[in-house]
Image (cartoon, helix red, strand yellow):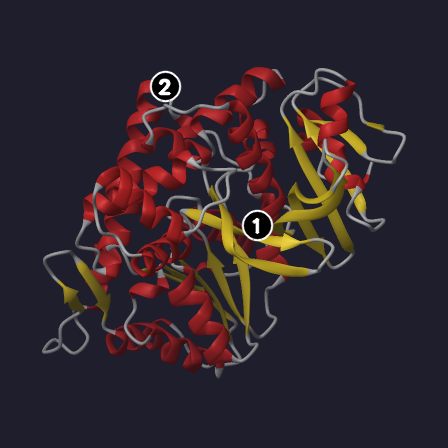
Amino acid sequence: MVKEIKRDKYLNESIARKGNGFIKVITGPRRSGKSYLLFTLFKNHLLASGVDENSIVEFAFDDDEFIDRLDKYFPDEPTKIWINKKRGIYVVNSKKFRSYVKEQTSYEGPYYLLLDEIQNLDSFVTTLNGFLKKPNFDVFVTGSNSHMLSTDIQTEFRGRSSQIRVRPLSFSEFYGFRGGDFASAYREYAYFGGMPAIMNMPRNEEKTDYLIDLFEETYIKDIVDRNGIEDTDSFRKLLEILASSIGSYTNPTNIENTFKSALSTIYSHQTIRRHIDACVDAFLISEALRYDVKGRDYIRGNSKFYFGDIGLRNAFLSYRQMDPNHIMENIVYNELLYRGYFVDTGTVEVNERNVEGKYVRKQLEVDFVCNTTQGKYYVQCAYRMEDETKRSQEERPLKNTGDSFKKIIVTSEDTLPWHSESGTLIVSLKDFLTNPNSLDI
């Protein structure tokens, strides 16, 4: 029997938005559990709360079993409208779909429309706008492309959409399913990540094969096809560079120079920027912008990129470059996003005397600047702090922010939470990942 994975955070967010008059948009990377959330967890909630099954209309726009149901409507018109048949890119005929919904519903209600991969519906914004005008419809949709969904819906619906961002399993979700001791669970998570499907795979070889296939056949193929990328070799090399540089600042111009000098290849920074944006839109990677803490402004030109799932990154690199510090930093970043923070990387400028006694400007790095409606947090990742010198080094940029916002150092070392003399909270990785209130100890 397959054990159920708890996604209580997203289920509760979905339940809280029932009947609010908005289109509920569930976004996230492919295979991260959006369909499971909608068609299993949320549907089971509706049934358990007394909703009649006939009042729930389900449709998956990437599933031929659902699409075939539309064939009887307007038989002279195609059900699949092919954008690129060779690459398998199509959208579903919205006219036929609206007829299908009309047949399944009446003026009474309410009806719950659960629509999966809505970006594969032709004119989906117009269709959803039509559903918004029906007071007996409560609409939940999923999609795997942030640009096609979030941008269009926010523009067209003018504040009448509500987004729920689903991510691969957080460590707490992973640990709640797996159990066992923290150290071995973290090693597994840092190696294979949190894609839900691997949780019921008993063998490591099976997990590896799944992640490699998912990266190649779903993510790369989808990004290449949807964005018309012709030079796939250069695009794959770009992904290798990004995967190898998590935790390091980079920018399209520097990457362009790498292609010129090391690979003797022309790959313009404009094209690189577009291809990076395509990866961000597919939720494969996230971009953390560089923020001047004292100047209170963004520093254009350099960003850090992190993978939405560390297991996909590791499998793509064939489990090379398994630096525990950078992997931990990626995991901490994803956890901060999971908790709802807006996360940037930080720069603090200080004036210091050099060996000649002259003042020079230096830039110190704060790993993460986390903003919430309640305030701001500064978070440093320190895999090891062997002695006072190392701790002082990690704490130095935090002491120079010039404000009183909460400052935290997360370390992999096993330690109880404690505060330094300057007020910085030192917390173990275990406490940080397993305690949702760990930043407020």
For the point 17% across and 54% down, which residue is it?
230
> Which residue is farthest right?
421
Front in this rendered view, residue 123 or 410:
410
Upstream in sequence: badge 2 or badge 1: 1
Mark 2 → mark 1, Cα distance in angstroms: 28 Å
Compared to 191, does 173 lie above or below?
A: below
Q: Secondary structure at mark 1?
A: helix
Residue 204, numbered circle: 2
For the point 58% across and 21% down, which residue is it?
179
- Residue bearing mark 1: 10
Residue 312's spot in the image, x, y percent?
Answer: 38, 35
Front in this rendered view, residue 171 or 441:
441
| Location of the C terminus (image quadrant) | top right
414 left or right, relative to 114? right
Mark 1 surroundings within 10 Å by alpha-carbon count, few (fewer than 14), some (14 through 19), many (20 or more)? many
Q: Is residue 16 visible?
A: yes
Is the Cβ of the residue at disc 2 closer than 8 Å to that at disc 1?
no
Residue 376's spot in the image, x, y percent?
Answer: 75, 52
Q: Is residue 2 visible?
A: no
195 left or right, relative to 346? left
Amino acid type of the residue tagged 1 in the rendering: Tyr
Compared to 336, does 3 lie above or below?
A: above
Mark 2 surroundings within 10 Å by alpha-carbon count, few (fewer than 14), some (14 through 19), many (20 or more)? few
For the point 46% across and 46% down, which residue is it?
250
| Location of the N terminus (image quadrant) | top left
Residue 431's spot in the image, x, y percent?
Answer: 71, 28
Residue 216's spot in the image, x, y percent?
Answer: 25, 39
Front in this rendered view, residue 41 or 259:
259
